[in-house]
Amino acid sequence: MTGLTRRSVLHGSLGLVAAGGLARPYIANAAATTAEVWWQQGFAQEEDIAFKKLVADYEKASGNKIEASIIPFAPLRQKEISAIQAGVVPDVMEYADFSFLPLNAWADKLVDVSDIVEPVKSQYIDTALRATYTYNNTTKKRAYYAVPTKAAGIPFHIWKSLVEKAGFKVSDIPNTWDEFLDFFMPVQDKLRAQGMRNIYSYGYQLTANGVDPAITFQGFLMAYGGKNLVTPDGKLRTDDPQVKDAAVKAIAKLTTPFKKGYVPPGVVNWNDADDNNAFHAKLIVMDFDGSLSTEVALYRKKEEYDDIVTRGMPLGNDGTKIPSPMPIFGALIPKGAKNIAVAKEFLKYAAQPNVLNEYLKGGLGRWALPLPEIAKSDPFWFKEDPHRTAYAEETLVSPTLPLYEAFNPAMADVNAEHVFSIAMIDVMNNGMTPEQAIDKAFKRAEEIFAKYPIAQT
Amino acid sequence: MSVRGPKRPRGYRRLRGADFGWAIAFILPYAAVFFVFVVYPFGYALWMASQPSLYAELLADRSYLPAAVNTLLFVGLGVNVKMFLAVLLSGFFLCPRWWIRALLAMYVLPWAIATTQACVSFHWMLQQEGLVNGLLSALFGIEGPIWFNNRWLGVGANILVYIWKWMPFWTVIFLAARIRVPRDLYDAAEVDGATGIRRFVHVTFPLLANLYLLCTLLSTLWTIGDFTTVYLVSGGGPAASTHVLATLGFHYAFDASKPALGVAAVMSALPVLIPIVILLMRKLQTSEIEL
Amino acid sequence: MSITLDFPSPAPRRYRLRRVLSEAGLVVLGVLILIWSLAPVYNMFLIALDPEEGEIEFAGNLWPPEPSLESFRSVITQEARYLEDFWHQFGNSLFIGLLTMVLTVLIGSLASFAVSRMRLSRGSLLTNAALLTYAIPASFLVIPYFRIMHSYGLSDSLWAVIAAQVAFAVPFAILILQLYGSLIPFELDDAARVDGASAVQVFLRIYLPLMTPALAVVAVYALLLAWNDYLYPAVLLAVRNMTVAVTQGQLFSDTDAEWNAMMAAAIIYVLPPVALLFALRRYVAASLTTAAISI
């Protein structure tokens, strides 16, 4: 103990006090350890840079080290699933699809992070909280199993120049649901009459590939008043006549334009990328697709960027506001992580409003910020760019609902099997009526939900 | 006329002393690779797929049986058409013309190109507004079909792409083998008046028959597990009707977060895979006696 | 000894006509093969030469409407989205590919020699068991591999991928080498032994030189297997040492990839295997020039 003189102890403890004073309140001790974080690669390099800055700032503030891997989207999914299955997990994972969180929470493979989310509940929009409040079949209760980080709205994307070329004005577009959608059919007629061979009104994802179709269906379902298909307690309400009616109307509204030739016939086998490509190629006038990726892809081409009109949901047929589906992404801590303490600290840090805000702003606003208060006070979201304004309005001001997977993991299975896409295709290609298709779909959904009984408290 | 290759010494030679040591030394690297990197993953995968409830779940999924049927078609047609054309074309590429040798370089390009990109290229070519339909309308004035809206066109497209990608590889295998065929066999046949097709049938084919069978068996094993082609060309659509077991399994494992079910989907083909492996092993034994 | 055919002159008309027709037939077949092989590659160029990002899919062009090498430039200068580490990843691909190739050829030829030339008793047990590697498709073994690489301490290491690729390539190598080796008479080995050659010398001086076409095929096969594989590098590697094939795998489900740059990258990425094929062509076609028979 020769090195431990009174002076050195005094200096040491002064140092600790100083560090403690400057440190943020959530840091319990100053022991520096390393945590491994897997995060999704952004859609613009700026997003990755912003994340790296977030990590660096955390490291400086806490003294811990973060080994952050920014992994492209597809390999991230494959690595995460391999990791959880093999039991070789990092400390923090940002999930990259909608089935991962509910299914793994159900299987008790995740660490409960309610101690991170509960204290800051009020900063979040309610939908974000409900999306991560998932059910664990071992404990038989719900808890927060992920910290929400990003939100994605589902806006409509419209080519202004095509609307104008057909002789209409964007201000002509009606604001009630059915009329809003019907507006685009004469646009195609007029454009075709002018000689444009390859032009269609709608780019609806009427396909059984990818994640878009389930979101499209949920959007249309809710527009007709069917939002209670799955209620927050996890029950499937196929017995509710209002839900069934809405579902039938939704399927009909999606498939009738296809049968009449207003949707490209190839949509039946499009994947998540094809509708973006079709929109960019001006094959379609309007697209109903998640996030601002359609616009952000054209960020550097000013003219085209400005030519796109981004807007949220119109009013329902009865004049009331209708909710839109809002997928939420977040970060979770798998069980078996080696450094849960630092993982939790890191997530607590990242969930701070100003930190999260700076990070998502760095990503050019492709993801919406699930924190209404700070978003409203920062001109970036509501004032600087018409696309972002519409997007922020749709996600933070207008009513929203999380994807049904959050209420019950059975919905993840239903969507993996594309039950409702099959219903659409049954009507389009196999001659079923919307009622028959929905009956069949509901029956299959009931079979699947029976495998995921949720105990009601 | 049947043809036999060079004769083997009868009886089996015992390896003596230093020879035995060398033989063991030579085989050790692969033995190590096998025991360290093959046995464990294999066992683990078998364990993952061992729950009977998985198979009940598979059968309940309406996409499973069509996928099994598609796999039979994909493998049956894909492997056999490809192999047959490969053996025929290996003859073509033996012709000593300078332009044929140059053509060989173009011909093997599909093998060298990354499967992902090539399949995406096909996916785009076969869209309603893609290159294929564009050519059909420009050259023949016909309006091409929407390739991926129809299950059978989709399956056909998958098979076509698969053959495009892998035929060059097998052609080269046959080519390398045929070069080695003793030329005096061909000379003798020529003297007997066998040319062209007849020579192929009576001289070339019997020599290649065993190789052909072995390649077919091996290719069958590989094709059952091929998911990239179908995944990227038809995407398994429309409405999951063109899935093969490999893509269905991949979808379960990585799209639906259910890896055990994914492995089970492919394991359900084991009753077919294992006999093929056994047949392959048997044939390999006998091939040591005749080519 | 080569045989040349002497034609009696003047050649009968019918014979000349038949030769012209068969030659024409060969040319037609050649043209068909050319179109068949290159059409999708042409489509890739169509996409790569487009200054826009991906509308080619729906634009219905037969010719590039505004050909531009911009996408190639952005790949080479690493400006294109997702391809910022293109050359580093290219290096990783090279490392993995070349090592897989060398190790497969080495391990495969040694094992095949021991079992089929030296007739190691019960050695065929191992080569048969090797074939079991193919009983479960590789794509479904990736999760077990993820786990064992962690157990062996090879997580995130290039060697993990190399080991996996070698494990999948060698059984095929052994198969092909055994088949090809059966064309080579044992008398050569025996004669060398009688002259006092050791096993190693027989391997190096007799076996390898005679097997070069098969070794060339195995080498190219191993390289391409490792070069173009998406799944194993995606799962087993860390971001810092990923290969180009993984980045290309973005296309699986990404809505925002710059397609023209991706295709340009694919075209650049195919150049090394093509170069290898070119370098090895004379080994594969070793006897073509001396085969004076036309079919």
Image (cartoon, rainbow, N blue to C red):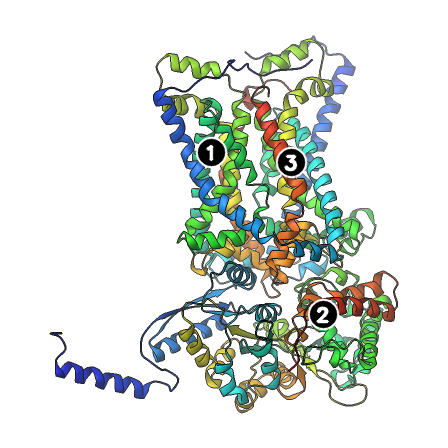
Q: Chain of mark 1?
A: C
At label 2, the amino acid type is: Phe
Give residue A19's position: percent from left, percent from top. Answer: 29, 84
Question: What crowding class fits label 1: few (fewer than 14 Cα within 10 Å), some (14-19), or many (20 or more)?
Answer: many
- Counting from the top left corner in percent of width and height, residue C193 is at 39, 15
Q: Secondary structure at mark 3?
A: helix
| A366 relative to B263, above or below | below
Which label sits on residue B276?
3
For residue A88, side relative to residue A218 (left or right): left
Q: Residue at x 59, y 78 (%)?
A: A141
On the question of residue B142 being in view, the answer is yes
Residue B116 left/right relative to C20: left
> Dot 3 falls on which chain?
B
Q: Which mark is residue C108?
A: 1
Q: Callout 2: 10 Å neighbours few (<14), some, many (20+)?
A: many
Compare residues B107 and B9 and report the one nearer the observer. B9
Q: Which mark identifies residue A449?
A: 2
Do the residues under discs 2 and 3 have CB atoms within 8 angstroms?
Answer: no
The amino acid at mark 3 is Ile
> The disc numbered 2 marks a residue on which chain?
A
Q: Please name which of the two marks, 2 or 3, marks the residue nearer to the observer.
A: 2
Q: Nearer the viewer, residue B19 or C162?
A: B19
Quadrant in which the N terminus of chain B is drawn: top right
What kind of element bears circle 2?
helix
Placement of C222 over or under A142, stated as above or below: above
Q: Amino acid at mark 1?
A: Gly
Place of residue A386 in the rendered image (x, y in percent of width and height, measured from the top left): 62, 83
SS state under label 1: helix
Contact between labelled residues 1 and 2, with CB atoms less than 8 Å apart: no
